[in-house]
Amino acid sequence: MSGWDVYRTPADTGDNALVIGEAFRAGFSPLFTGLSVVIAGALLGVAALLLMVAPRTQQPSPWAVSRGVATPVLLLALLAAVPPLVNLFSLTMTQPRPYLIQPPGRLIGGVLLACLGEILLILGATGSAGWKRRKASG
């Protein structure tokens, strides 16, 4: 089943279409559907756009943009990281052994891309003042 099939199944039964609370066994085994992952990706895109249009702070400063912009950007970035990380954790740690479902390469690649996006947003919001100082002095 794809993330969209997982979305359609609970939506058709009237359950929560964004996350399945117990996907593999009783207890902590949540699985976010395709819609949740798309929403998280959109949040990551909005955070990047906010960062791109925000005015820069005067350097030297520990922040590249004002804290009023950096704080929501960082919170959106952290929120966007939740669905792919939880899905990968649930698939690898909570399903019964032997594994019934192997995490596909697309999911692992998506998690790696999401982590890269998170790192880039954090670097963009906090700035790289140390790099600028080294470059200016060299």
Image (cartoon, rainbow, N blue to C red):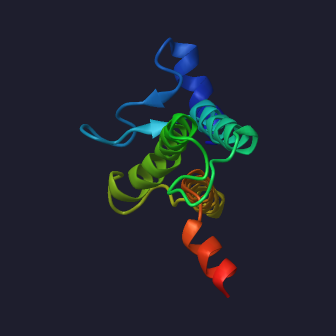
**Which quadrant of the figure contains the C terminus?**
bottom right
Outermost residue toward the top in this view: 14
Left or right, 81 with reference to 131: left
The residue lying at 48 percent from left, 44 percent from top is 78
Front-lying residue, 59 or 10: 59
Tell me where residue 86 appears, x and y as whole percent: 43, 47
Horizontal side of 75 relative to 69 (left or right) equals left
Instruction: Look at the picture and state if 92 lies above or below 56.
Output: below
Question: Is the N terminus in the top left, top right, bottom left or bottom right quadrant?
Answer: top right
Residue found 53% across the figure and 34% down from its top: 68
Q: Quadrant of residue 131?
A: bottom right
- The percent coordinates of residue 62 (x first, y second) are 50, 57
Q: How many marks?
A: 0
- In the image, farthest residue toward the left: 27
Place of residue 132 in the rendered image (x, y in percent of width and height, measured from the top left): 64, 71
Vertical relation: 78 (above or below) 105: above
Where residue 135 appears, as percent x and y from the top left, is 68, 80
Viewer-nearest residue: 120 or 87: 120
Of the pair 125 and 76, the residue shown nearer to us:
125
What residue lies at 53% left-to-right and 56% top-to-bottom?
A: 61
Q: Is residue 35 left or right of residue 52?
A: left
